[in-house]
Amino acid sequence: MIRELHNIDIAPYTSFGTSARVEELIEWDNCEELLALLAQRRKASPHPTHYTILGEGCNTLFTDNFSGTIIRSVAKGIEIVGRNKEEVLVRVAAGEIWDDVVRWSCEQGLWGAENLSAIPSSVGATAVQNIGAYGVEAKDIIAEVEYIDLKDLHIGHIAASECAFGYRDSIFKGRLAGQALITSVTYRLSTTPKPHLDYGTLRPEVERSGNLTPMGIREAVMAIRARKLPDPKMIGNAGSFFKNPILPRNQVEALRRLYPTMPTYEVAGQPEKLKIATGWMIDTLGWKGKRVGNVGVHSEQALVLVNHGGAEGKEVVALAERICREVKEKFGVDIEPEVNIVQ
């Protein structure tokens, strides 16, 4: 199925809920049909079309009307494509809701995705953004990504080891940005227990329930997130708006001497660096719960910017920029958005 929509308001397609008119939105659930449409358009026009790719819109903010074409996958499907005594390979269509996949994997008793519960995302976006939470990132379980090469209009496959995964980063935000439309992601899940509990308050939450299973950990993660993060269905937001900076260890230690309560985290594979908590810095500046016009900072989690109703994308960006300036002035640290800002 291919659905072509024209001159629409993008607000219903993003979790921030800010309005912007979009020239064209293409929704697809069949790869062959999409390839045929793109080939037909290329033949009809001598000028190559630049396509913007949208998932569930949970990490995207439009700041103005958009003149161009957006492609959005609504393709569904979860399929086991490989299995041995220790691992199961699961191929998932890009349009699946990520949390539905996590719930399915936990119901199967499979380990690996449970810490990533309740993250608003499509499956395709898990690979683009390298989503992460509670000590686990998507890169830890991704085996392979299938995509359409928008330059040559062919199907490509790329192993996880070639995806240049980093902190909320990947090749799909770098060298292949705007050139690769993800059609499916294959995850490598474990049949044997591999709990990751040593992050934040996850371990005590699981121990209180006594349920050390994938589903038990999922429920603990969901409970913690429900206490800290606003539901986009209730108030517009995109989850964590800012990244947590990863800085040289000596710079962080100098900051910690000035601010002994500043939370810091080790960075896997980078012993010379530490991650610091942007939310703590924003909270220290007194922004938590503050409102400026139609936008504000969430009262329980300072990393989250919210649309109190009727906000424009430009208002959100203006608030973000103001917070960035104040963090720089106070702590000497540059912070940057995790959210994809479309201007």
Image (cartoon, rainbow, N blue to C red):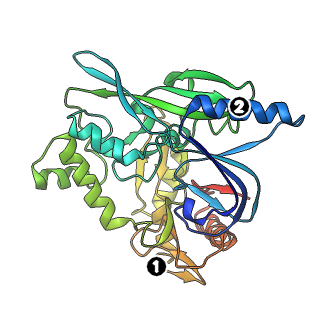
Locate residue 117 relative to residue 165 in the image: left or right: left
Q: CA–CA distance between discs 1 and 2? A: 43 Å
Specify the amino acid type for callout 1.
Gly
Q: Residue at x 64, y 39 (%)?
A: 173
Q: Is residue 171 visible?
A: no
What label does residue 289 carry, if any? 1
Locate residue 270 relative to residue 24 in the image: left or right: left
Q: Nearer the viewer, residue 91 or 115?
A: 91
Going by the picture, which residue comes out furthest to the left? 210
Query: Which residue is disc 2 drawn over?
Result: 150
Tag 2 secondary structure: loop
Q: Quadrant of residue 232?
A: bottom left
Specify the amino acid type for callout 2.
Leu
Q: Nearer the viewer, residue 123 or 174?
A: 123
What label does residue 135 carry, if any? none
Q: Residue at x 39, y 63 (%)?
A: 261
Q: Residue at x 46, y 41 (%)?
A: 123
In the rendering, at what x and y percent does residue 83 appear? 29, 18
Labels 1, 2: front one: 2
Q: Residue at x 33, y 60 (%)?
A: 225
